[in-house]
Image (cartoon, rainbow, N blue to C red):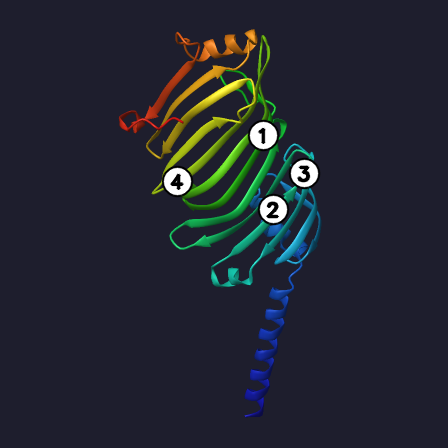
Amino acid sequence: MKPLRTCLIGFVLLLVLAGALLCFLPARWALPWIEPSLHGIRLQQVSGSVWNGRAGAVIAADGRTRGQLQWQLSRSALLGQPRLRLDFDGPQLHLSGGLERLPGDEVDVRDASVRASSTAIGHELATPWGKPRGELQLQVAHARLRAGWPMQLDAQASWHDAVMRTPQGDVALGELQATAQARGGVIDVQLRDADSGPLQLAGGLQLSPLGWRLDATLRSRQTDPMLRRWLATLAAPAADGSTHIRRHGGLAANAPPAPTL
């Protein structure tokens, strides 16, 4: 009996030690298992635990330091139900939000915010109408993602100091805003301007896994020849000087038009 009792005591002690190790596991010990899944991103100056830690330097694949990262991971992750809070702060990108993995390959996002300059998104980001410049701000009150697609969404976005850089020069657009709602995987986005910039915008964008549809009206508030020429590259101007854009892709061509404001 005594050897059995000794074995049981030793087993219990091992469980206690293993539990203590899991509760206070240093984040730097877990780096060899984490970094291979970060697609070339490296974490340096790591402190704290796996559950509540910090990386003083986040190094991108190009070797540049992008900012600092803090995280909080719930211990329910040990039961397969992780809840994660991230706060990334850099000179060109700030990101924060809470994530929770749900059954059925779903992720719940709450109280997320993003502030990014166009250079943070990418120097080579370009469209047929020019390279966007300015600052993007995004607030997501709630989103439910399934396989990465928003099945539910409540979000607002604004594009501050919006500029399209073209070979002919910079086209100032002012501040543009969007409100997005999603139900059942169909995203409806209302587009508008801030009422005081050089570009007047009213329209809607509808997206789903099957396609997309854009219906918007744009008009120059001022007599800026650069802006008027840029609008003419989007579509032929109407008699009243407005530019009406209708675009669609995928099976969304058969969907009803998105409402305009």
Q: Quadrant of residue 217?
A: top left
Circle 1: is it few (<14), some (14-19), or many (20+) Cα within 10 Å?
A: some
From the viewer's side, name the closer residue of 44 and 241: 241
Residue at 31%, 28% in the rendered image: 252
Instruction: List the residue tagged with mark 2.
Output: 35
Say whether disc 3 or disc 2 marks the residue closer to the N-terminus.
2
Residue 187 visible here:
yes
Q: Quadrant of residue 59?
A: top right
Residue 105's disc number:
none
Q: Identify the secondary structure beneath mark 3.
A: loop
Circle 4: is it few (<14), some (14-19), or many (20+) Cα within 10 Å?
A: many
| Residue 227 horizontal/vertical position (percent) | 54, 11
Instruction: List the residue tagged with mark 4.
Output: 182
Which dot, 1 or 2, sits closer to the camera? Answer: 1
| Amino acid type of the residue tagged 1 in the rendering | Ile
Give how far apart the Cα atoms at labels 1 and 3 are.
Answer: 13 Å
Q: From this view, report whether residue 28 is shown above or below residue 222.
A: below
Give how far apart the Cα atoms at labels 4 and 2 are.
Answer: 33 Å
Residue at 55%, 7% in the rendered image: 225
Q: Pointers 1 and 3 in contact (CB under 8 A)?
A: no
From the viewer's side, name the closer residue of 105 and 256: 256
| Residue 246 horizontal/vertical position (percent) | 36, 19
